[in-house]
Amino acid sequence: MFIQSDKLKIAKIITIEIHKKLKENIKFQNIARPPSFSTFPCACCGNASWILQNILQHYYDIDCNVVSFEILTNGLTKSHAWVEIDTSTIIDITYGQFDKNIPIYYGSGESIHYEYKNEGENVNLTPPQWLEPVAKEIQSSIKHCVCI
């Protein structure tokens, strides 16, 4: 079993590799209706978070969850999702859509996370049907880059 600092180190390495792959807008093979990441990191937080969570949990035994909130403002709904490890560490693989200088956020939360948690409504997302094959394809493409 990994200790907390080891889990976070591994999570950071894996997150960086997944971020690189999604930024390339990779084309998925043999997957019906794969997700598009052409606007990554914008409007991709839910899908990217599901991929990150799946890979961390299934391939690296890191217990984590996708957290998502919606805020209704002036009749418009905006939402954001990220991954939490042990409910205390946020990994936001799409944080770059809010701050171009910080493409990935690791920590206990920034103003954007507090805004969604305090003003928003928690949304229970269901994993998408394409998740397993997409996560497997991304994992197989990054495993040669990551020596743990």
Image (spheres, grey):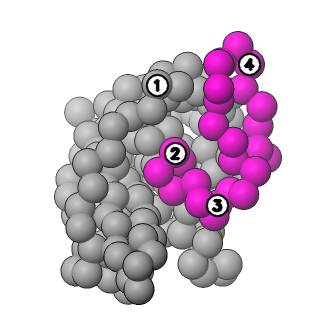
Badge 4 density bin: few <14, some 14–19, many ≥20, Cα 10 Å = few
Considering depth in this image, is 81 or 23 the residue closer to the camera? 81
Q: Position of residue 67 (x, y in %)?
A: 31, 55
Badge 2 density bin: few <14, some 14–19, many ≥20, Cα 10 Å = many
Q: Name the residue under label 2.
A: 47
135 left or right, relative to 53: right
Q: Does the magenta stretch include residue 52?
A: no
- Considering only order in the chain, which callout, 4 or 2, is on the residue closer to the N terminus? 4
Answer whether residue 118 is visible to the viewer in this image: yes
Question: Which residue is painted at 46% across and 25% down in the image?
Answer: 129
Distance from label 2 to label 4 (Cα)?
A: 17 Å
Q: Name the residue under label 4.
A: 29
Whether tag 1 and tag 4 are in contact, CB under 8 A, the answer is no
Q: Is residue 30 magenta?
A: yes
- Front label number (1 vs 4): 1
- Considering only order in the chain, which callout, 2 or 1, is on the residue closer to the N terminus? 2
Question: Which residue is painted at 76% across and 44% down in the image?
Answer: 25
Q: Mark 3 points at which residue?
A: 41
62 left or right, relative to 26: left
- Considering only order in the chain, which callout, 4 or 3, is on the residue closer to the N terminus? 4
Question: Which residue is painted at 45% across and 75% down in the image?
Answer: 76
Q: Name the residue under label 1.
A: 129
Q: What element carries label 4?
A: loop
- Start-end of magenta stretch: 24-48
Q: Where is residue 124 in the image (x, y as percent from the top left)?
A: 26, 48
- Considering only order in the chain, which callout, 4 or 1, is on the residue closer to the N terminus? 4
Q: What element carries label 3?
A: loop
Query: In the rendered view, would you say 72 is above or below 93?
Result: below
Distance from label 1 to label 3 (Cα)?
A: 21 Å
Main SS, magenta residues: loop
- Residue farthest top in this picture: 30
- Amino acid carrying label 1: it is Gln
